[in-house]
Amino acid sequence: MSESNGTITVAAIGDLHVTETSVRPYAALFAEISEKADVLVLCGDLTNFGKTKEAEILAEDLRSATIPVVGVLGNHDYECGQPEKVAEILCQAGMRLLDEQAIVVEGVGFAGTKGFIGGFGRGELAPFGEGEIKAFVDVAANEARKLENALRSLRTERSVAVLHYAPIAETLEGEPIEIFPYLGSARLADAIDRFENVRAVVHGHAHHGRYEGRTMRGTPVYNCAQFVVRPQFGRPYALLEV
Ligand SMILES: [Fe+2]
Ligand SMILES: [Fe+2]
């Protein structure tokens, strides 16, 4: 919980993948996290297929959280073509969706977007040639633009960037290198590195990736996919002092 030096404790977990047959999958965990942290951050893939029933099951469990909950959706939450519906159900249960709109909790800013694929370094897809390629790259660029605008709107001394897709390749290590371009986009890190008040970046999506990395500027990045965090800490969520 909050330290006397003014930091807050941020709990972050991604890739909950709630299914229709899940029974109170996160109620106990959210109650536990509420005892240990000041804010809970959900890093996308909250549902397994973006079904209404899945979102309703998670929404029920969100009522066990007694601290502010902020989050972004993941690609799985889009699978049924109704991400707005999934978001609405979760927001009605108290989650605050970080997309375009940044949020301040106890003096710390939170800005986020789902992000998109597109690759890193020499593997980054460029908007050249066919219209389809340009449209594809435009989606990735737009996600980065939304993140940058949300971060810019924050006047806080400390901010946290929240994503589903990875902004750097380092936290993907452990995944097959062939699929790195489908796990994130360097454009997201380019946006983050324009700001000096970003103290941490959290993301999910790469279930077999690595927990920790850094942007070019040196800002710490944490892959908070629960399957990455659990082997590291014996619990499925990360705890960060910000
Ligand atoms: Fe996932
Ligand atoms: Fe994902």
Image: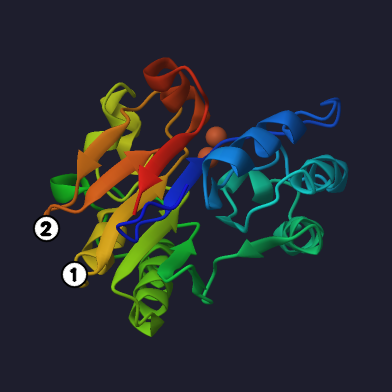
Instruction: Please say if the residues under marks 1 and 2 sit with CB atoms less than 8 Å apart.
Output: yes
Q: Position of residue 112 (x, y in %)?
A: 46, 63
Q: Quadrant for residue 172, please give it.
A: top left
Q: Position of residue 8 (x, y in %)?
A: 41, 55
Under circle 1, the secondary element is: loop
Residue closest to the eye, 81 or 64 = 64
Where residue 217 is drawn, which disc sits there? Answer: 2
Examine the rendered structure and indicate whether residue 224 appears above or below residue 59.
Answer: above
User: As drawn, is 43 to the left or to the right of 2?
Assistant: right
User: As drawn, is 120 to the left or to the right of 182?
Assistant: left
Q: Quadrant for residue 137, please give it.
A: bottom left
Query: Is residue 72 at least partly visible in the picture?
Result: yes
Examine the rendered structure and indicate whether residue 128 appears above or below residue 167.
Answer: below
Of the two numbered discs 1 and 2 in the rendering, the one whose residue sits closer to the viewer: 1
Disc 2 crowd rating (10 Å Cα; few below 14, some 14-19, many 20+) is few
- Tell me how far mark 1 sits from mark 2, CA to CA: 9 Å
Q: Quadrant for residue 15, please give it.
A: top right
Q: Residue at x 42, y 48 (%)?
A: 165
Give the amino acid type for the residue marked by disc 1 in the picture: Glu
User: As drawn, is 11 to the left or to the right of 123?
Assistant: right
Q: Residue at x 42, y 71 (%)?
A: 107
